[in-house]
């Protein structure tokens, strides 16, 4: 399929901005804004279209280490900040972009011009892209604190020769003179601004190759909580087994596996205080938890060629008699792969440790699924097939 890198990248930005909920306490469009600022600064360096696209990729994904790192609450704040650079650098290697000539962009994006950063890199030891992302990140964080543009420019000037080079500060001041720069940073305009500024690239990818790419998202999702550390990976493996059991075509099989990889994307928007809660969720907490399937749909539906994948991923908490969420679909709205994913997700979850219970045996898990069949919630044939396929 023709894989639109731009739409995939924008979807990545939504996912990473979900992560900011636990880092900054709310969704701020942080990654999109850092991407936009970086592109505007990149223009002043006369980068090629390919270089600009790569800069945007690194800028949008600069906090990709934040999910796994955020869990480590025992570490100090500075140690966590350093570690998210290390984790991010490791994670980004799996993305389907043009990274061969770039090293340590994410690793060094918090380095300072004077050598006072985490790794004591200074001046030209810090890659150009890292320097651009650093000043863009700093600007966006100040911008989010409701300072005036004059105050933001003044604070960045104060960091000349310390955090940033003289040339980098000069280029930032140049772009900041445009009224459109500040208007595009507003939440209502930032998405269209990034889409307009981003160079356009497409790749020919098979669904098998896309499965390898989306496995990274599966790892990111699973790392969000200790109790879900194998959930997406486990579901993906079972999805592959069931797809082969039902003789899906190779393309349909890989679409189904991709849907399993991505089905819980929206959980990145759910606080760990809810995901890791050892007791029963309050009504308000459960309401927030239920929203994760809606978020999954909103991220995936932006990607061309993902229509079926979006349905199969986002419908995993619906039920055949209409009692599920978020759309209360019934059996007439849910195709066969969606119905498989619904039952398989429940089975996978029951077979895992959760904060409020230990893992269940196959027999006990099947007892719960069969009770749901009797209530008209799940497809009886699918549940019977799951019992046979995974009985050992």
Image (spheres, rainbow, N blue to C red):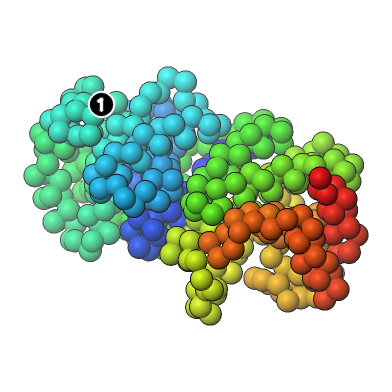
Q: Position of residue 131 (x, y in %)?
A: 26, 33
Q: Is residue 163 left or right of residue 280?
A: left
Instruction: Specify whether 266 is left or right of 381.
Output: left
| Quadrant assignment, res 85 | top left
Q: Position of residue 187 (x, y in %)?
A: 38, 61
Residue 96, how many percent across, how many down? 56, 32
Q: Residue at x 72, y 42 (%)?
A: 237
Total numbered labels: 1
Residue 224 to residue 199: above or below: below
* Left or right: 333, with 40 as reference point: right
- Residue at disc 1, secondary structure: loop
Quarter holding the N terminus? top right
Q: Quadrant of residue 175?
A: top left
Give the residue displayed 27% in from the left and 59% down from the top. 144
* Depth check, front residue: 163 or 218: 218
The residue shown at (53%, 37%) is: 200
């Amino acid at each position: 399929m023709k894989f639109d890198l731009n739409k995939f990248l924008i979807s990545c930005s939504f996912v990473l901005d979900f992560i900011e909920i636990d880092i900054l306490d709310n969704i701020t469009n942080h990654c999109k804004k850092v991407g936009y600022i970086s592109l505007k600064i990149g223009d002043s360096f006369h980068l090629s279209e390919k270089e600009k696209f790569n800069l945007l990729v690194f800028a949008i994904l600069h906090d990709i280490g934040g999910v796994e790192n955020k869990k480590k609450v025992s570490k100090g704040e500075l140690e966590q900040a350093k570690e998210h650079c290390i984790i991010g650098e490791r994670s980004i290697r799996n993305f389907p972009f043009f990274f061969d000539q770039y090293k340590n962009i994410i690793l060094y994006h918090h380095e300072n011009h004077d050598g006072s950063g985490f790794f004591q890199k200074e001046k030209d030891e810090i890659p150009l892209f890292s320097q651009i992302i650093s000043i863009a990140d700093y600007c966006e964080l100040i911008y989010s604190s409701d300072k005036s543009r004059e105050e933001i420019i003044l604070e960045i000037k104060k960091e000349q020769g310390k955090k940033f080079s003289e040339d980098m500060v000069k280029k930032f001041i140049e772009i900041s003179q445009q009224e459109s720069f500040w208007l595009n940073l507003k939440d209502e305009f930032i998405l269209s601004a990034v889409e307009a500024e981003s160079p356009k690239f497409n790749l020919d990818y098979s669904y098998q190759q896309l499965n390898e790419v989306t496995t990274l998202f599966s790892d990111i999702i699973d790392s969000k909580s200790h109790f879900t550390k194998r959930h997406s990976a486990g579901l993906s493996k079972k999805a592959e087994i069931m797809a082969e059991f039902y003789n899906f075509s190779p393309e349909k099989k890989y679409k189904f596996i991709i849907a399993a990889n991505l089905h819980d994307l929206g959980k990145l928007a759910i606080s760990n205080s809810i995901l890791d809660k050892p007791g029963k969720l309050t009504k308000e907490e459960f309401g927030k938890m239920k929203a994760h399937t809606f978020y999954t749909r909103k991220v995936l539906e932006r990607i061309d060629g993902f229509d079926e994948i979006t349905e199969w991923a986002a419908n995993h908490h619906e039920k055949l008699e209409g009692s599920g969420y978020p759309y209360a679909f019934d059996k007439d709205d849910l195709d066969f792969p969606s119905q498989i994913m619904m039952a398989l997700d429940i089975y996978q979850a029951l077979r895992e440790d959760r904060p409020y219970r230990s893992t269940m045996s196959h027999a006990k898990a099947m007892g719960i699924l069969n009770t749901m069949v009797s209530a008209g919630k799940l497809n009886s044939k699918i549940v019977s097939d799951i019992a046979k396929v995974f009985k050992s």
